[in-house]
Image (cartoon, helix red, strand yellow):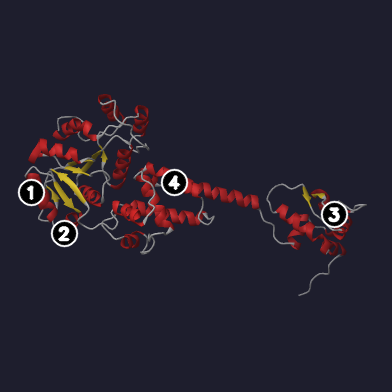
Amino acid sequence: MTHPETTPGEHTLRRPELRPLWHTVHNRLSSGRSVTRVRLGPLDDAQREALADLLGLDRLPDARPSVALVRLEEAVTELCGRTVRETVTELVGPLDDRAGERRRQEGERAELWTWLDGHATVRAQPALAAWTASCRAAGLVGGSPERTRSLLTDALTVLAALPAGAEPLPVFAARVLKGDSHALDDGTRLSTLVLRALATLHDTDPPQSAADRRALWTRVGVADDGLSATVLVGGLHPAGDGPLARVARVCAEAGQAASLTLAQLRAPGGFTLATDSAPVVHAVENPSILALAVRRFGSDCPPLVCTSGWPNSAAIHLLRLLANHGAALRYHGDFDGEGIRIAAYLLDKTPAHPWRMTAADYRAAVARTPHGPPPGRLTEAPWDPELTRAMTEHNTAVVEELVADVLLTDLAGEGSAGTR
């Protein structure tokens, strides 16, 4: 293959003394911004002479000259008939667009954080907003929106799968993360991210020791055994011959509460709800409410489940089991910051609906007990945004025990809001 001979003009442009000029122009044009002048230097005498020859100057320029791009364009076009952009592309290489690349990266980052804030798990549990803010503050993993989104997707997948069903951490990780049993090993970036989210949900400090991390995993059903995770129930009369049905039925008929283990809930055996229509099963946060209900109603106690604070794997498993057998679930908890987070968590993990948990219910309750303690850190209540505003306005917590009479009236069927 033959190459055309270099013209005198092109030979001038290729002079070694002009290399600083072309590299500087290439760098400025690659910025992606408007360029009118380029500053060179310091230039030695030979480079100054070459620049003077190129531009047709009658004297040597300064050692640090500022060259107008329009003048350079005229000189280059006169010498070879090409533009400055074409010339530096030929002599140095393809031009970049750093400003455009920055805009593209900024758009990708903005899209990433918008996606995270709008994720279904984050929307369902607004307490996670503090976690998403910390993720944004930490920045991108390796400067890559793609790698960051992949990591966050895995973290959200884990959060959506919790509480776990009494599984060791490697077994849980393999089940929810495409067979990778080591994905949540202690010290991994993903494990740290998930534990930070759990600490935010439970309003605790991020775990600092191995024991703290194990305790937090255990709290959400990872590495539980089938006996340590339990749930309190009252008035549950399931039909069937399995351990769950028999234990719950015997206790209910005796007017007693039952403590069901996760092992009993998962044991094989028949289980049906003995009713001609879909029963309503109420759930509460505090054992004292269950105790009052059992004391008042005895063997006629309506079906009632107690989460005893944050629902563990046994509580979630039972509520899902009841819903799968046709029960309509209703939940009530404390009117304080943690109570709102617990309610949002339970409503996200099960088909339950709020029970007397609206802003109107709170205002009615606080009117009866206006001098309670502060509610603590408040986050949005997804089922009623007005509730958090009302609690912020009154700055008063109302624990479940203070509305026990209202709840018991609903359970007795004497009120009109039993399934609110």
Q: Which residue is mark 1?
A: 250
Q: Quadrant of residue 1?
A: bottom right
Q: Count residues near mark 2 (Cα–Cα under 10 Å), then give few for <14, some for 14-19, many for 20+.
A: few
- In the structure shown, which secondary structural element does the residue marked by tag 2 occupy? loop
**Which label's residue is closer to the chain start, 3 or 1?**
3
Element class at badge 4:
helix
Residues at circles 4 and 1 in contact by the CB criterion of under 8 Å: no
SS for callout 1 = helix
User: Does residue 117 appear to the left or right of 100 in the view shown?
Assistant: left
Residue marked by disc 2: 268
- Residue holding disc 3: 75
Cα separation, mark 3 vs mark 1, equals: 100 Å
- Residue type marked 2: Pro
Type of residue at label 1?
A: Val
Distance (Cα) linking label 4 and label 3: 55 Å
Residue 282 in view, yes or no: no
Name which residue type carries label 3: Ala
Q: Amino acid at mark 4?
A: Thr
